[in-house]
Image (spheres, rainbow, N blue to C red):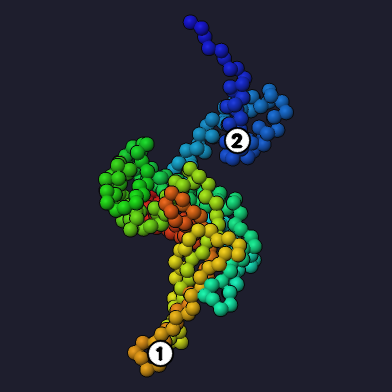
Amino acid sequence: MRRPRSRGNAGIGAFLCSQEMACAHAFPTLAARVTSSRRSPAPFRTALFDPSWPLAFGLWLDSTMDGRTGIDLLLERGKLRVDELVALARELFASGAVAHEPIPGTETARVHIGAKPDAAWAFLAMEATHNVRCALDQLAWRLVEIDGGTPGRHTCFPIADKAEGYGAALKNALRGASQAHRDAVRGLMPYRTGDDRFPDLQDVDNTYKHRLMIPAVVSSTGLEMRVSLEGVEQLAFRVNIPGGGALTDGQVVVTPAPFEAGGGDGELPPMRIDHGVTVEVAFHLPHLGRTISVERLYECVHGIAEAIEPLVADVA
């Protein structure tokens, strides 16, 4: 029988390179030692097979799997990225790059867009949502482990589009976890019509697996209601209603005239409703036919991290 040809140093070299990169993050002193040895193949091979490395490297890997460490790192990374995204959006609008000019004699205005969101913002949204989704799955894995079960390919943090059938999905995804922990996850209502932040996060994460969503400036209808009550100077309520697709420079948008009612001899208190031009940075989900704003991504990432904290504390 013919023996397969040995790859010799080529195969070993590929392995060594991968280990060098991994160790560089774990052990800076060892990384420096490996880096300096690149000039000479012999010292490099000697350093790699130092008997203290496998033990130390194994201990480092094991330590990241215990408790809540990995979950916390993922959540913090997700929050960091979405915070950067929010800061960029605020900077864009504060610069005056996006403005509107009322068209005299009409209930319309012309939008001026001097600068658009950078396409690189998409990677911040991608990393933020994917890190939190991974943290949820790691939480599911740890819950099964601490309850004495054996996690496997089926283990995940279940998120659904509807409440119907969620119980069965939960039972399978957290097979091996205690009933108390399954009930706690179900209590979070991570499905549509429950806590929509969970399915919104999953929609963005799933979309980024197949296509890159480029951010754009989109319009929404800003409604501001001011109500004057006796003894109270004024109460103000503002609601943004998501609008259509991306705005273009020079596009005309509708700005209805203010609506006033009440006051005088009537029974209603004085009331005024203003319709403003509201713009925001959002990402288009083409297969769902809707957009998700930077503000909503912030709510999802930070809100989910806060909501799951009691469960994360259990795996510490």
Counting from the top left corner in percent of width and height, residue 223 is at: 46, 73
Q: Which residue is drawn at 37% across and 36% down?
A: 153
Front-most of 54 and 154? 154
Crowd class of label 2 (few under 14; some 14 to 19; many from 20; radius 10 Å): few
Discs 1, 2 touching: Cβ within 8 Å: no
* Residue 53, picture quadrant: top right
Farthest bottom residue in view: 265
Q: Which of marks 1 and 2 is nearer the N terminus?
A: 2
Closest to the observer, 214 or 184: 214
Q: What residue type is labelled 2?
A: Met
**Tag 2 secondary structure:** helix
Tell me if residue 16 comes above or below residue 201 in the rendering: above
Residue at the far right in the pictured view: 39
Q: Who's the residue at 61% across and 58% down the image?
A: 116
- Which residue in the structure is indicated by mark 2? 21
- Residue type, numbered disc 1: Gly
Extreme residue toward the front, this view: 105
Decide which of 213, 194 is in the foreground and name it: 213
Whether residue 16 is situated above or below residue 304 in the rendered picture: above
Q: Can residue 302 be seen in this view?
A: no
Crowd tier of the residue under label 1, counting other residues whose Cα lies within 10 Å: few below 14, some 14–19, many 20 or above: few
Q: Is residue 55 left or right of residue 261?
A: right
Pointer 1: what residue? 263
Q: Residue 289 carries which label?
A: none
Residue 163 picture location, percent across and down: 29, 53
Residue visible at 59% across and 51% down?
Answer: 119
Compared to 57, does 201 lie above or below? below
Q: Quadrant of residue 39?
A: top right
